[in-house]
Every structure is written in C-alpha cells, then in structure tokens.
Image (cartoon, rainbow, N blue to C red):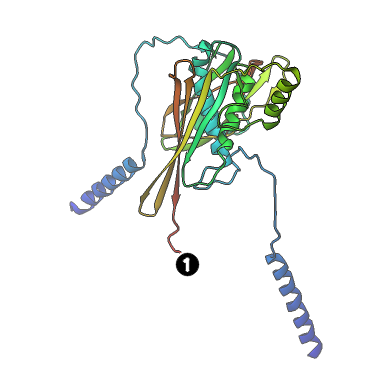
C-alpha cells in the first residue's frame, strides 16, 4: 500500500514536471524580410510601408517624363526640406534614402551632397576647400538642376472602436532655373486598428 | 394554411437581404472599342498554389519604356470571387545576362480587391539593364 502511494506520487510529480516544462516558453528570434508581408504591422508606418511609398513615388516620377527634359544627364538634384507632420518620431531618410538610391541607380540623377538640406558630405566639402587652398584655384560648385521637397502628413479618424491613420507622402520636384514644379505626387497609406473589447 | 408559405417567403427574403449585404462586387464600364494600343507580352506561368490561382487571375501583362530606357511593366489582375480578397505581389527584375537585379523598393506589396474586380498593378525598373521581370503572388 505504501509502495503504491509512493509510486503514485512519483508519477504525479513526473507528470507535473512534464507539464510545467511544456508551458515554458523561450525567447525566439527569426530573421524576416523587412520589406515583406511578414514584417510586423502596426498603426504606424512600418518597413514595408516605407518601401511601398518610396517605390510608388519613384515609379510616378520616372513615368512622368519630367526627367527627360533635364538639361543634362545625369541631372543634378539637391534634397530640400523634408517635413514630418506626423505624430511619429521617425527619421525621414527611411523614405528619402530609398528614393535617392533608386534615382541614382537610373543613371538619370546625381545628387549633390554639398548643397541642400539632406545629408551633407562634410569630408567632401573639406576636401574641396583643401583643394582650393593648395591649387589656388576656385573650385566650381555644380549647382543643382532640381530640388526635391517632401512632406509627411498624418490624419487620424475614429469611429467607435476603429481608428484609421492615413499617412500622406507628398513630394515635389522643382526646377531650379524656373522655380516651377515639374512633378508632384501624393500617395497615401491608410491603416485601421480595432481596439479590443475588454481593456485592463 | 398560409402560415408555412409566408414563413418560407420570410426566410427567402432574409436570405436575399443577407446575401446582398455580403456582396461587394464591382461593376465596370468602359469604351466599347479601346483607343489604347498596349504592348501585350506573352507570359509563362508557374502555379504552385492552386487555391490562389483559383482566386486571382492575371488577365494580361503589358510593357512600355519610360524616361527613355526604363522598363515599365503593368499587369491586370482579376478577383474571381464574389467577395473582397487580399493579395500580396512582388516584381523582380532580371538583366540581359539572366542575373537578378536587386532593387531597394521592389518589395511584397498588399492589394485589396473587391468582388470580381479587375485592377492594374505596375512598376518601373530603376535600372536600365533590366530586360525581363518576374511577378510573384502570395496570399
């Protein structure tokens, strides 16, 4: 009788330990395509949204034939202000860099890094100044043919438990010589989030 | 005696109302004889997901050159079902040597189609070396 109850207790302990082992979860990390559908979707702008917006804006610019009227190939472009009017604290280079890479790869645009409000090539500027000092000749700065201006806007609408965040990506290409906007585009990404029924 | 008949009629009415509520099909109207002259291309299809192929159909693919030498591809996709469906698609580019050209912006993109709706998806290659493309779909 005693032997039997000890055996029973042992079996129960074993079962319990197996059960608890089964409940233990370990941290799991996997590598996903940052621009793919496996990327975590939130009410904010995720990596897939940035890539999507950049692709749509680039495709629109290239389809517009605005660059076909450029005074030279590659045309020189400077990045103007990129205004972030969303509630998100984001680095706008998540959008602008993708567009810069895409436009540079076309061979139709070269982006100046010594003018404009985008990323600045500090070492290149210093090297140019050094060259001027050593040679005694004034370096000729190539002025841009175009400037790129962008603005991000967020609009939030609520209805019951549903919240919709609409992000507008606005972009303009301005011809420096005339001051005219030769291309403009706006693309929107809308994200709906439903609040859970019971909150704590 | 009339009671079962009227009950049946009531059930039928409710069913019609319910089914109408679920339908989100799209009616489309266009010029009978199109003035556009798209450059359609013949395509090769590799189907590994028959359910997906039974839900969406690629009606046509056409191409054009933009900005002088950049290839633009447009595909017309049709939702074969009577309710709204979601689809992911991705374009890939290939150069004359058959090498894949990576593009920072060619990603999986989401697409929502209403019932029986046809829409066009398009992209422009950012690399002038692109001569071919691959279009992939997944649910």
Q: Nearer the viewer, residue A13 or A190?
A: A190
- Which residue shows up at 58% across the image and 37% down it? A94
Residue at left 70%, top 65%?
Answer: A22
Residue A28 picture location, percent across and down: 70, 54
Quadrant of the rendered structure where residue A77 is?
Answer: top right
- Identify the residue at the far right of this view: A3
The quarter of the displayed image where residue A130 is located: top right
Q: How many residues crowd mark 1 within 10 Å: few (<14), some (14–19), many (20+)?
A: few
Q: Secondary structure at mark 1?
A: loop
The spot of residue B123 in percent (x, y) is 54, 23
In this rendering, the answer to whether B31 lies above or below A187 is above
Q: Is residue B135 visible?
A: no
User: Does B84 appear above or below A185?
Assistant: below
The relative height of residue B50 versus residue B43 in the rendered view (above or below) is below
Residue that carries the numbered disc 1 in the rendered image: A200
Toward which corner of the image does residue A141 lie, by quadrant?
Answer: top right
- Report whether A14 appears left or right of A147: right
In this orientation, does residue A168 appear? yes
Question: Is B4 displayed left or right of A128 in the figure?
Answer: left
Is A160 or B52 nearer to us in this picture? A160
Residue B117 shown left or right of residue A79 in the figure: left
């Amino acid at each position: 009788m005693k032997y039997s109850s000890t055996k029973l207790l042992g079996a129960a302990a074993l079962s319990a330990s197996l059960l608890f082992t089964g409940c233990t979860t370990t941290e799991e990390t996997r590598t996903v395509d940052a621009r793919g559908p496996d990327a975590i979707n939130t009410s904010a702008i995720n990596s897939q949204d940035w890539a999507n917006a950049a692709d749509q804006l680039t495709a629109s610019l290239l389809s517009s034939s605005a660059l076909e009227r450029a005074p030279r190939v590659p045309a020189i472009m400077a990045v103007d202000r990129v205004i972030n009017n969303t509630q998100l604290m984001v680095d706008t280079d998540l959008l602008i860099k993708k567009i810069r890479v895409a436009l540079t790869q076309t061979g139709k645009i070269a982006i100046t890094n010594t003018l404009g409000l985008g990323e600045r090539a500090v070492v290149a500027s210093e090297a140019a100044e050094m060259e001027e000092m050593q040679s005694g000749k004034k370096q000729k700065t190539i002025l841009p043919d175009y400037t790129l201006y962008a603005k991000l806007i967020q609009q939030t609408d609520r209805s019951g438990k549903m919240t919709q965040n609409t992000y507008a990506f606005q972009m303009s290409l301005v011809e420096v010589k005339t001051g005219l906007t030769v291309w403009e585009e706006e693309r929107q990404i809308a994200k709906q989030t439903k609040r859970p029924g019971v909150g704590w | 005696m009339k009671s079962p008949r009227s009950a049946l009629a009531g059930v039928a009415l409710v069913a019609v109302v319910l089914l109408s509520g679920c339908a989100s099909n799209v009616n489309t109207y266009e010029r009978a004889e199109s003035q556009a002259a798209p450059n359609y291309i013949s395509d090769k299809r590799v189907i590994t997901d028959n359910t997906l192929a039974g839900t969406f159909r690629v009606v046509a693919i056409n191409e054009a050159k933009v900005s002088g030498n950049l290839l633009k591809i447009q595909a017309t996709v049709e939702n074969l079902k009577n309710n709204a469906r979601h689809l992911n698609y991705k374009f890939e580019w290939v150069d004359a040597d058959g090498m894949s050209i990576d593009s920072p912006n060619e990603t999986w993109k989401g697409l929502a189609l209403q019932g029986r709706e046809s829409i066009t998806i398009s992209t422009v290659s950012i690399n002038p070396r692109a001569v071919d493309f691959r279009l992939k779909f997944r649910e």
